[in-house]
Amino acid sequence: MGQIDLERLEFYAYHGHFPVEKVVGNKFILNVSIQTDCSKAGQSDQLEDALNYQEAYELIKEEMAIKSDLLEHVATRIIDRLYASFPSIQHASVKVSKMNPPMGGQIEKVSVTVSR
């Protein structure tokens, strides 16, 4: 078993409950961890034997472009797409962080993690 980590993926997106969040947008940071069998790719050195993390990034980017009210919804959509696109995944987690959320105080970020 191996683990692929896509760390500190940064997106500007329009997720949030409040109408202004859907217009003004915000910065989001994602961390994605995927456990999969890496043994064949480790031996062959061939991309077709590996989980293509460039493709994983592209599908994450597509999901981040779809507006959602809740971070839970964003994270669940991403993890669902990962499992649908890569049958070799044994376990995955997606952490979505909204930077400087509009909560009426000085807050660095709020994060939601979905694991399956």
Image (cartoon, grey):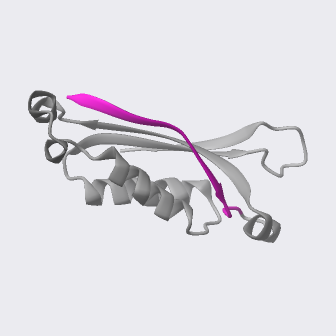
Q: Could you tell me residue 29's position as x and y percent?
A: 61, 43
Q: Is residue 43 left or right of residue 108?
A: left
Q: Residue at x 27, y 58 (%)?
A: 85
Residue 31 magenta-highlighted: no
Q: Could you tell me residue 70's position as x and y percent?
A: 62, 60
Residue 20's place in the image compared with 111, above or below, is below
Query: Toward which corner of the image does residue 41 lie, by quadrant?
Result: top left
Q: In the image, which residues are magenta?
A: 1-16
Query: Toward which corner of the image does residue 5 lie, by quadrant?
Result: top left
Viewer-side residue, 70 vs 59: 59
Q: Residue at x 17, y 35 (%)?
A: 37
Q: Is residue 46 left or right of residue 7?
A: left
Q: Quadrant of the C terminus?
A: top left
Number of labels in the image equals 0
Q: Is residue 22 left or right of residue 59?
A: right
Magenta region, main secondary structure: strand
Q: Could you tell me residue 16's position as x and y percent?
A: 70, 62
Q: Could you tell me residue 31's position as x and y percent?
A: 50, 39
Q: Residue at x 28, y 60 (%)?
A: 84
Q: Residue at x 53, y 58 (%)?
A: 74
Residue 6 magenta-highlighted: yes
Viewer-side residue, 5 vs 102: 5
Viewer-side residue, 25 vs 115: 25
Q: Quadrant of the N terminus?
A: top left
Q: Is residue 87 left or right of residue 106?
A: left
